[in-house]
Amino acid sequence: MDTKHLLQECLDRLERGETLDQVLARYPAQREELGRLLVLATSLQRATPKMPEPAKARVRYELHGAMRAHTLGRGIAGWQTWLVRVALALVVVLALGGGTLVAAAETAPGKTFFPARAAFNETRARLATEPEAAIVLHLENAQDRVDDVRALKERGGLNEAPIFLMVGATENLMVALENNPRAANRATLERAQSLAQTERALLQDLKQTAPVERARHNADTLYQLSESWFPLLERLLAR
């Protein structure tokens, strides 16, 4: 059984009432890796707030698109282990406090640890209790994703995963605006509109210039999706 299905089976067993030790005892050969993944997965489940179905659908779209971006030669176990290691490293950096400035360069868009920082900040946005604060966080995260795609494109290291995640971050912003139409002031809405226009222009460019064919194809698909952002923003700005 591959790691993805094994992890799902373990989560199902936990939901049915088995303890973590009981579940891990069933798979001694994978105990160490499964233990880290299960602790991370259950922690995220407890921390994740309930979201309306449109938001869930967009998050699923973002996740599935990123997963499809991985080549067939790269096993699921490899990237899951990498994700856990990066997440743990980021937690250590944040906990130490003083090391944050040292790590800042590597967590900038286009850098090694940016995906972990972005995931951390996007979780903060989803957990924010004040709609105004959540919208601002989503806007900042979406801008970071745009900057990441630009940086990766300039270095020639762009594939479709950062493009999916960029559009997914902006979709999260649009969901937050749609669900809380009176929570954003005009300045925030104008920033969101400017971001959407910039991102749409970037997608238009990537349709022709992305380094790999799959990235060009998905930029074309996501460019069409981005058309849905503007009626919402225009409606909110017209209030």
Image (cartoon, rainbow, N blue to C red):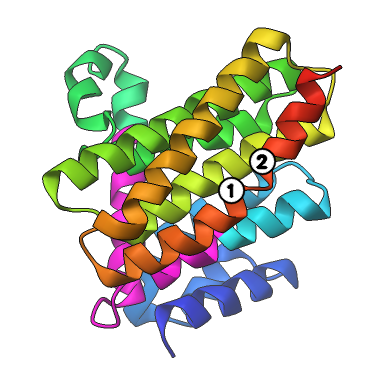
Residue 66 lies within the magenta run: yes
Q: Residue drawn at (75%, 23%), measured in percent from left and top?
A: 129
Relative to 30, say whether 230 is above or below.
above
Which residue position is annotated with label 1? 226
**Quadrant where the image shows the C terminus:** top right
Q: Nearest the camera: 114 or 110?
A: 110
Q: Residue drawn at (22%, 44%), measured in percent from left and top?
A: 152
Q: Nearest the camera: 185 or 101?
A: 185
- Picture coordinates of residue 48, whole percent (x, y): 68, 44
Res 229 label: 2
Relative to 118, say whether 70 is above or below.
below
The magenta span reads: 62-90
Secondary structure, mark 1, is helix
Res 107 label: none
| Mark 2 and mark 1 residues within 8 Å of each other at the beta carbon | yes
> In terms of image quadrants, where is residue 8?
bottom right
Relative to 58, say whether 176 is above or below.
above
Q: Main secondary structure of the magenta part?
A: helix
138 relative to 208 in the view: left or right: right
